[in-house]
Amino acid sequence: MLNTTIRRHAPFWLSIAAGIAIWEIAGRSTSQAFMVPFSTTIVQLWELVQSGVFIRQFLDSAELFMTGFVLALAVGMPLGMLLARVRVLRIGVEPYIMILYATPMVALIPFILSMMGFGFAPKVLVVFLFAVFPVIYNTVEGARSIKPELIEVAQSFRSTEWALWRDVMVPYTLPYAMTGVRQAIGRALVGMIAAEFFLSSTGLGQLIMTASQNFDTAGVFASVLVIALIGVALMRAGLAIERHFARWRQ
């Protein structure tokens, strides 16, 4: 059993070790103004944590990310299933969803700034707009892929509309929706940093900007490393949730 576990996870950890080694070698082979070694990045991150600056900025960014991301989930999933269920509504709204999904949301930040000014609410709106459309799109596609036979069987047993959603639509759509959620995680992190760059400098975005202005390459890499690790961890958590609730497909 132990040997099987080791063989299963060995490629992953070997890949991580190789990546760290390449980063360390590349950082020592180039100018410190462009890239720093992995070891220097970790030391800088530890110093930021000890000073208390990193924790404070991290909590600010976490609050922004979670608020915008949770709102995107709360709107995107129910709306996606509703659009799939109500054909007329889907036909009317789907073109706008596709247009906004393809629109680079960074271009809308000046418009949001002019309408809402600085503050927490416009930054939440930016994160929400970055994250909501992948959730809606994938949820719609998942709900539309439900076999008509499943709906007919449920209706033949006189299932109510609520029972149809609970027992057929939600379980069948969840794996597709979670694909959208994983895509939304990366987009929401980008939206978080973009909002902190262009609206008001707070959180990890401010930390990156300050480090860049001070030519602190290690500080920039430390912040980016944390954001990347958060993104990977959240995506892995989303995949675990999907596997748990989609065991019926196996």
Image (spheres, helix red, strand yellow):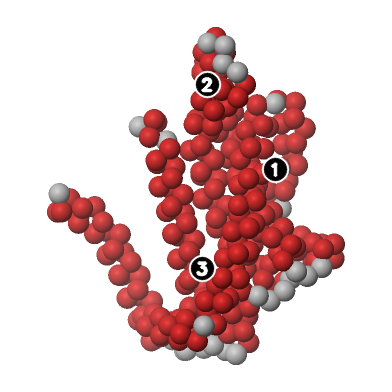
Q: Which residue is mark 3?
A: 227
Q: Is residue 147 left or right of residue 30?
A: right
Q: Is residue 157 left or right of residue 84?
A: left
**Which mark lies nearer to you, 3 or 1?**
3
Classify 10 Å Cα crowding around label 1: few (below 14), some (14-19), many (20 and above): some
Tell whether label 1 touches label 3 (CB within 8 Å): no
Q: Amino acid at mark 2?
A: Lys
Q: Residue 197: where, in percent of width, then height?
A: 68, 73
Q: Residue 195: where, in percent of width, then height?
A: 68, 67
Of the numbered discs 1 and 2, the one sitting upstream in the chain is 1
**Element on which disc 3 rests:** helix
Give me the residue at 39% from left, 30% from top: 248
Against 243, is 67 above or below?
Answer: below
Of the numbered discs 3 and 2, the one sitting upstream in the chain is 2
Tell whether label 2 touches label 1 (CB within 8 Å): no
Classify residue 152 by image quadrant: top right
Q: Residue 31: where, in percent of width, then height?
A: 47, 89
Q: Which residue is mark 1?
A: 98
Classify residue 211 by image quadrant: bottom right
Against 208, is 193 above or below?
Answer: above
Q: Which residue is mark 2?
A: 147
Q: Residue 156: where, in percent of width, then height?
A: 55, 9
**Element on which disc 1 rests:** helix
